[in-house]
Image (cartoon, rainbow, N blue to C red):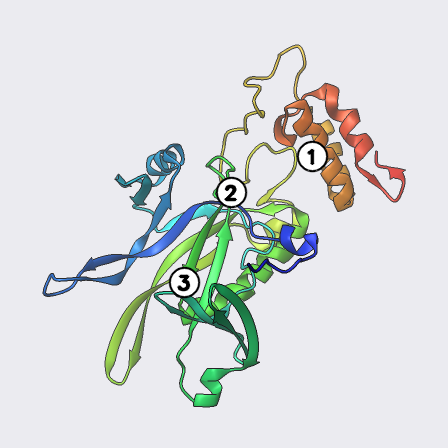
């Protein structure tokens, strides 16, 4: 009996984020003769998830009818654009070339080196070699982009994943993610994920298709001024949700223990911005243990949080 090789725990734990559901920009439709189905692009977003409460909330926001496919809930919405926040590393190592068969992914390649699975009985190992498509001068793989997003209006149960084989997305998505990542040095940035219809004329034929695109809701001037950024004390994703976020498991705030004043929120935002990652983590864990989130924390916890937001041993005012 074979056993899996021992791997450092840092490699095992450095996995992907938990999935809340999938975003899709296509569906299966009947063929002309009606005997089978074929994939077709659509101009509005589809959401699929096993969480009925989440999909009902999305249907209320973006329209459409929820279909129960044996415990997997499918919503073809009326929305061509949705609000999103990008988590760390939202592209997860893509764009990349992949080849798939009925048995799963058979090649994963960067155009120079390809990884292929080698099966020996029940065991699977992986081998790296020179790109097979380049050697055979035959493009057999497809470009693949996997984008993970957070939908801020839904419960934070994980990320929503979208996969596309679009050449346009392969060319454009990585650069737009890099731009948003740069903007997010000031905080989480409100963005829009949209479906953009396009056409291409080649060989006298016109091909219509759709491409997922990311857009920033704020201009660079707005971002420089602090607008369009979900700051720690805002209670909402700027430009996305007008109402304050509820406290974690506590309901309404006790009027005898009010929320922070504007000056205190500014003090907290400055401390959070200048703190290092370890200090921010310590502050988050403290608030979670107390049953609050940063957006709606009461005044009596302010000093405890500020005490944890320490940079190079100096407490921030």
Q: Which residue is mark 1?
A: 284
Residue 176: x %, y % from top left: 54, 62
Any part of residue 205 in sight: yes
Q: Within 10 Å of the Cα at label 1, are there few (<14), some (14-19), or many (20+) other Cα atoms?
A: some
Relative to 217, does residue 242 appear above or below in the rendering? above
> Residue placed at 66% from the left, 10% from the top?
256
Q: Which mark is residue 9?
A: none
Q: In this orientation, does residue 270 appear?
A: no
Q: In what element is the residue under mark 3?
A: strand
In three-dimensional space, the C-alpha distance between marks 1 and 2, rounded to whole angstroms, equals 18 Å
Packing grade of label 3 (10 A; few <14, some 14-19, many >=20) is: many
Q: Is residue 110 above or below residue 156?
A: below
Secondary element type, mark 1: helix
For label 2, the residue is 158
Question: Quick one: 2 or 178, which is closer to the camera?
Answer: 2
Instruction: Specify few, some or many for label 2: CA neighbours under 10 Å numbering under 14, 14-19, or 20 or more.
Output: some
Q: Quadrant of the N terminus?
A: bottom right
Using the rendered view, name the quadrant where residue 248 is placed.
top right
Q: Nearer the viewer, mark 1 or mark 2?
A: 2
Q: Which mark is residue 164?
A: 3
- Classify mark 2: helix, strand or loop: loop
Of residues 102 and 29, the one nearer the viewer is 102
Gap in angstroms between the C-alphas marked 3 and 1: 34 Å
Q: Tell whether label 1 touches label 3 (CB within 8 Å).
A: no
Give the residue at x 50% y 70%: 96
216 relative to 73, above or below: below
Which numbered disc flags the more N-terminal residue, 1 or 2? 2
* Numbered label tally: 3
Task: Answer above or below: position of 301 versus 80.
Answer: above
Question: Considering only order in the chain, which callout, 3 or 2, is on the residue closer to the N terminus?
Answer: 2
Quadrant hosting residue 42: bottom left
């Amino acid at each position: 009996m074979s056993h899996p090789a021992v791997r450092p725990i840092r490699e095992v734990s450095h996995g992907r984020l938990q999935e809340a559901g999938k975003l899709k920009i296509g569906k299966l439709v009947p063929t002309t003769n009606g005997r089978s189905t074929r994939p077709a692009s659509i101009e509005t977003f589809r959401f699929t998830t096993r969480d009925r409460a989440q999909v009902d909330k999305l249907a209320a926001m973006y329209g459409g009818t929820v279909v129960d496919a044996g415990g997997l809930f499918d919503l073809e919405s009326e929305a061509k654009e949705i609000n999103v926040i990008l988590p760390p590393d939202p592209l997860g190592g893509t764009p990349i070339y992949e080849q798939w068969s009925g048995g799963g992914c058979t090649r994963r390649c960067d155009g120079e080196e390809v990884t292929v699975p080698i099966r020996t009985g029940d065991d699977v190992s992986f081998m790296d070699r020179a790109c097979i498509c380049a050697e055979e001068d035959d493009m057999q793989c497809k470009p693949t982009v996997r984008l993970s997003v957070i939908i801020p209006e839904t419960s934070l149960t994980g990320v929503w994943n979208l996969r596309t084989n679009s050449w346009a997305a392969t060319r454009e998505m990585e650069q737009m993610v890099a731009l948003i990542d740069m903007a997010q040095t000031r905080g989480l940035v409100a963005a829009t994920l949209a479906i953009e219809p396009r056409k291409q004329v080649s060989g006298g034929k016109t091909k219509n298709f759709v491409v997922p695109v990311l857009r920033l809701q704020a201009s660079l001037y707005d971002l420089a001024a602090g607008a369009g950024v979900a700051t720690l004390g805002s209670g909402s994703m700027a430009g996305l949700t007008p109402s304050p976020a509820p406290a974690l498991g506590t309901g309404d705030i006790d009027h005898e223990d009010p929320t922070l004043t504007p000056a205190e929120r500014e003090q907290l935002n400055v401390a959070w911005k200048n703190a290092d990652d370890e200090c921010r983590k310590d502050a988050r864990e403290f608030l979670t243990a107390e049953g609050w989130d940063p957006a709606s924390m009461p005044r009596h916890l302010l000093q405890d949080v500020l005490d944890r937001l320490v940079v190079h041993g100096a407490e921030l005012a």
